[in-house]
Image (tube, helix red, strand yellow):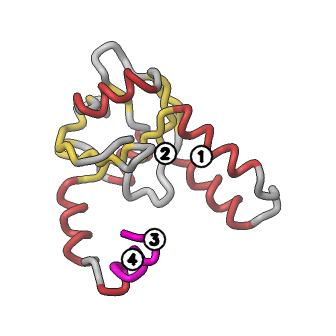
């Protein structure tokens, strides 16, 4: 399971060096293949291939004519690419996603349980300030025992 936050950088070629804690977990549990995508173009989502295949299995159970499935697939395929981690532990973020999410230079990499999320550091901080946790959020989580 991926958890925590690791500030890092995306180099001028668009490569993200996976933070050591996350890379260790990847080496132990997964492999070098990833599907990198986004559902909104604001953050990059890095799925170890095995985790993305679980998403695909769930998608396969939804009828192809379902409009929500079509929207989801349109977005994740538009932003998405299969990538392989290189020997230095770097993955190449798709150019269209780097530009859309502004994930160049200083970024933050978050563990999101089964995948990693990469966000522009300043944009993420601004979003947290604009969208604070509310009492309604806390109540919704309490319904799940959190």
Which residue is situated farthest in the bottom direction here? Answer: 135
Q: Is residue 52 above or below residue 123?
A: above
Q: Which residues are magenta?
A: 137-146
Majority SS type along the magenta span: helix
**Tag 4, which secondary structure?**
helix
Label 1 crowd bin: few (<14), some (14–19), many (20+), radius 10 Å: some
Q: Nearer the viewer, mark 1 or mark 4?
A: 4
Which residue is situated farthest in the front direction here? Answer: 145
Alpha-carbon span between mark 2 and mark 1: 7 Å
Left or right position of 38 against 131: right
Task: Give the mark, 4 or 2, whose residue is nearer the N terminus.
Answer: 2
**Tag 1, which secondary structure?**
helix
Q: Is residue 14 above or below residue 85?
A: below
Residue with the mark numbered 2: 37
Residue with the mark numbered 1: 77
Contact flag, marks 4 and 3 (Cβ < 8 Å): yes
Q: Which mark is residue 144?
A: 3
Residue with the mark numbered 4: 142
**Quarter of the picture holding the C terminus:** bottom left
**Tag 3, which secondary structure?**
loop
Left or right position of 87 against 106: right
- Which residue is drawn at the image coordinates 30% and 25% (left, top)? 24
Q: Position of residue 112 (x, y in %)?
A: 38, 50
Camera-side residue: 8 or 74?
Answer: 8
- Which residue is drawn at the image coordinates 31% and 27% (left, top)? 23
Contact flag, marks 1 and 4 (Cβ < 8 Å): no
Q: Nearer the viewer, mark 1 or mark 3?
A: 3
Contact flag, marks 1 and 3 (Cβ < 8 Å): no
Q: Is residue 61 above or below residue 9?
A: below
**Quarter of the picture holding the N terminus:** top left
Membership of 144 in magenta stretch: yes
Contact flag, marks 2 and 1 (Cβ < 8 Å): yes
């Amino acid at each position: 399971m991926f958890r925590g936050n690791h500030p890092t950088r995306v180099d001028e070629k668009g490569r993200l060096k996976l933070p050591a804690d996350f890379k260790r977990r990847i080496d132990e549990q997964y492999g070098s293949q990833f599907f990198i995508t986004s559902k909104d173009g604001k953050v990059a989502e890095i799925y170890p291939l095995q985790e993305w295949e679980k998403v695909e299995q769930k998608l396969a159970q939804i009828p192809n004519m379902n409009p929500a499935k079509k929207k989801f697939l349109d977005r994740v395929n538009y932003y998405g690419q299969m990538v392989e981690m290189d020997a230095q532990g770097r993955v190449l973020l798709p150019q269209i996603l780097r530009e859309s999410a502004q994930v160049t230079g200083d970024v933050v990499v978050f563990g999101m349980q089964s995948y990693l999320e990469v966000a522009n550091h300043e944009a993420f901080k601004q979003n947290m300030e604009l969208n604070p946790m509310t009492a309604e959020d806390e109540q919704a989580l309490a319904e799940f025992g959190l």
